[in-house]
Amino acid sequence: MVFRQQSYAPHDREITIQAGLTALRYGNLEVRGMYRHFSYHAPEQNVTTDQNAVLVNPRWNNFIDVLNFPEGKPINRMLRHALFGPLEDRAVPYLGLLAGGLVPGRGANGPGYLLGGQVGVRFPLTFGVSLDVALEYSQYQINFQGADGISQQWVMTTGIRF
């Protein structure tokens, strides 16, 4: 969940809420379903948008383990140690794709698409609860002040996953 309200240059408000669930897990592969609501209101610029997106998020967990060579000092162990330090055995790095639809997209009320990818890491805290940190890139269709276009964004997300 993101909440930002700015009272100085310009006066605006932004809210983002995301919820998801793991629908399928097979070994190091999983498929998640997600819902995301984004709301931006800037009354001084006469800009208001409320977008709703439904996404499919397939992920490849522990992708670093594909570098399990050479036998003496595997590359994946060195990367895990360099990136995660003392948490190297608990961290679950992943690569993911994002694909889905959002409303509004094209036109004032028409549907649009969202495509993107993410790289992140999940730190299990206890049974069924983990801390998730990811860097995400996405492109999506948007209608802004009557003109259709493609918006691109980089987002860093942090959240608790159940």
Image (cartoon, rainbow, N blue to C red):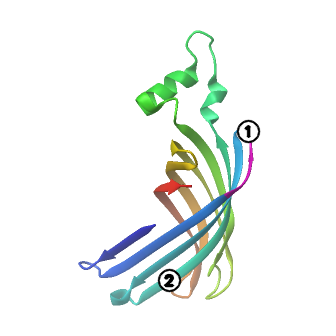
Of the 4 image quadrants, the one containing the C terminus is bottom right
Q: In this view, does 37 lie above or below 115?
A: below
Which one is in front, 157 or 49? 157
* Residue topped by disc 2: 49
Query: In the rendered picture of this protein, how many numbered marks are placed on residues?
Result: 2
Find numbered disc 2 in the image and state the secondary structure of the residue it sits on.
strand
**Residue 65: percent from left, percent from top:** 63, 29
In this rendering, position of residue 68 left or right of residue 12:
right
Amino acid at pointer 2: Thr
Q: Considering depth in this image, is 157 or 123 the residue closer to the camera?
A: 123
Name the one closer to the observer, 44 or 1. 1
Q: Name the residue under label 1.
A: 27
Q: Where is residue 135 in the image (x, y as percent from the top left)?
A: 50, 51
Give the residues drawn in magenta, as a range. 22-27
Whichever of labels 1 and 2 marks the residue nearer the N terminus, that label is 1
Which residue is most to the front?
Answer: 127
Name above or below for residue 107 compared with residue 136: below
Predominant secondary structure, magenta span: strand
Q: Would residue 100 appear left or right of 15 to someone viewing this image?
A: right
Q: What element carries label 1?
A: loop
Quick check: is 93 in the magenta stretch?
Answer: no
The residue depicted at 62 percent of the width and 36 percent of the height is 62
Residue 50, percent across and down? 52, 82
Counting from the top left corner in percent of width and height, residue 3 is at 39, 71
